[in-house]
């Protein structure tokens, strides 16, 4: 029987509504810094977006949120069609971009002074697209284990994902795992690779593992080239994919990067 991961102390539930009327369920984790914040520093709010088929109550995701709170408040939400949120998943397209945008807007409305979007896998592509196409621009963007382009079938895990999304039998299986899928795309939205160059001058961090079984390093390298010299790029030795591979040292490193790149 799997061991449950407790929510970080002080976590509270929150709901927000997207412009198209979908109610998203999420959590807010209060900051727990190891020491006093420098007087000139702006408090950080991390809006964290999970990977496909996960949720904010997935144990690796809760561990990540608990580690990240050392650097600021963590606000995380279930993408539509996932977890306790309503609606149906667009599997990383415009619906997910709208979900991130609604979460950033909600954080701003609640008084967030500096918002850092942090996306993993499907969420990693969504935060890249939201930073350019959304209404609520973040102050910094961190994309971990992101895909660069659509319809990737060159790895076994991604062939399984496409079977889930594109076949009747697969969609039934996805439903049993708690993922409620919308209709397949008629027209593909702009891919992360097509928009990432427009994120500058907003600080951007791209992170990828050299053991990623879903998206080979080709995706990371393509995004780095397109993003241009202003982006920070890390290949992390031994790191696999998204939430499952996010170790405490990696989360610490991301938190310090965010702190160092948000001005007073």
Image (cartoon, rainbow, N blue to C red):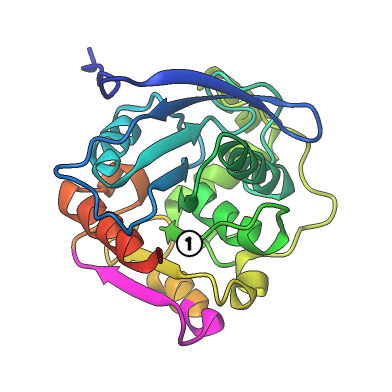
* Nearer to the camera, 245 or 197: 197
Which corner quadrant of the image does residue 258 belong to?
bottom left
* Vertical side of 177 occupied by 168: above or below: below
Residue 104 placement (x, y as % from top left): 59, 44
Q: Is residue 230 magenta?
A: yes
The residue lying at 37 percent from left, 27 percent from top is: 58
Which corner quadrant of the image does residue 255 belong to?
bottom left
Residue 216 placement (x, y as % from top left): 40, 67
> Could you classify mark 1 by the number of other residues whose Cα lies within 10 Å: few (under 14), some (14-19), or many (20 or more)?
many
Q: Is residue 17 left or right of residue 142?
A: right
Q: Tell me which segment is drawn in magenta.
A: 224-237
* Nearer to the camera, 256 or 240: 256
* Nearer to the camera, 260 or 51: 260
Q: Which residue is mark 1?
A: 140
Q: Can residue 121 be spotted in the picture? A: no
Q: Is residue 64 left or right of residue 178?
A: left
Q: Is residue 183 left or right of residue 255?
A: right
Quadrant where the C terminus sits is bottom left
Q: Residue furthest front?
A: 39
Quadrant where the N terminus sits is top left
The residue lying at 78 percent from left, 48 percent from top is: 185
Residue 158 placement (x, y as % from top left): 50, 51
Q: Can residue 28 be spotted in the picture? A: yes
């Amino acid at each position: 029987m799997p061991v449950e991961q407790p929510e970080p102390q002080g976590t509270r539930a929150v709901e927000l509504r997207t412009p198209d009327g979908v109610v998203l369920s999420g959590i807010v984790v209060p900051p727990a810094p190891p020491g006093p914040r420098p007087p000139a520093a702006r408090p950080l709010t991390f809006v964290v977006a999970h990977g496909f088929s996960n949720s904010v109550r997935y144990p690796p995701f809760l561990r990540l949120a608990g580690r990240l709170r050392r650097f600021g408040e963590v606000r995380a939400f279930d993408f539509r069609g996932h977890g306790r949120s309503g609606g149906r998943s667009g599997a990383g397209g415009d619906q997910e971009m709208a979900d991130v945008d609604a979460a950033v807007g909600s954080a701003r409305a609640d008084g967030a002074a500096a918002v850092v979007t942090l996306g993993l896998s499907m969420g990693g592509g969504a935060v890249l697209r939201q930073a350019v196409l959304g209404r609520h621009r973040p102050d910094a963007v961190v994309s971990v284990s992101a895909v660069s382009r659509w319809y990737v079938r060159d790895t076994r895990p991604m062939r399984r994902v496409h079977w889930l999304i594109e076949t009747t039998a697969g969609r039934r299986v996805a439903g049993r795992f708690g993922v409620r899928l919308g209709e397949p795309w008629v027209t593909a939205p702009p891919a992360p690779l097509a928009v990432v160059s427009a994120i500058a001058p907003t600080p951007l961090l791209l992170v990828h593992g050299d053991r990623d079984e879903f998206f080979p390093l080709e995706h990371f390298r393509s995004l780095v080239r397109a993003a241009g010299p202003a982006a920070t790029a890390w290949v992390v030795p031994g790191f696999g994919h998204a939430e499952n591979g996010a170790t405490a040292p990696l989360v610490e490193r991301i938190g310090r990067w965010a702190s160092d790149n948000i001005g007073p």
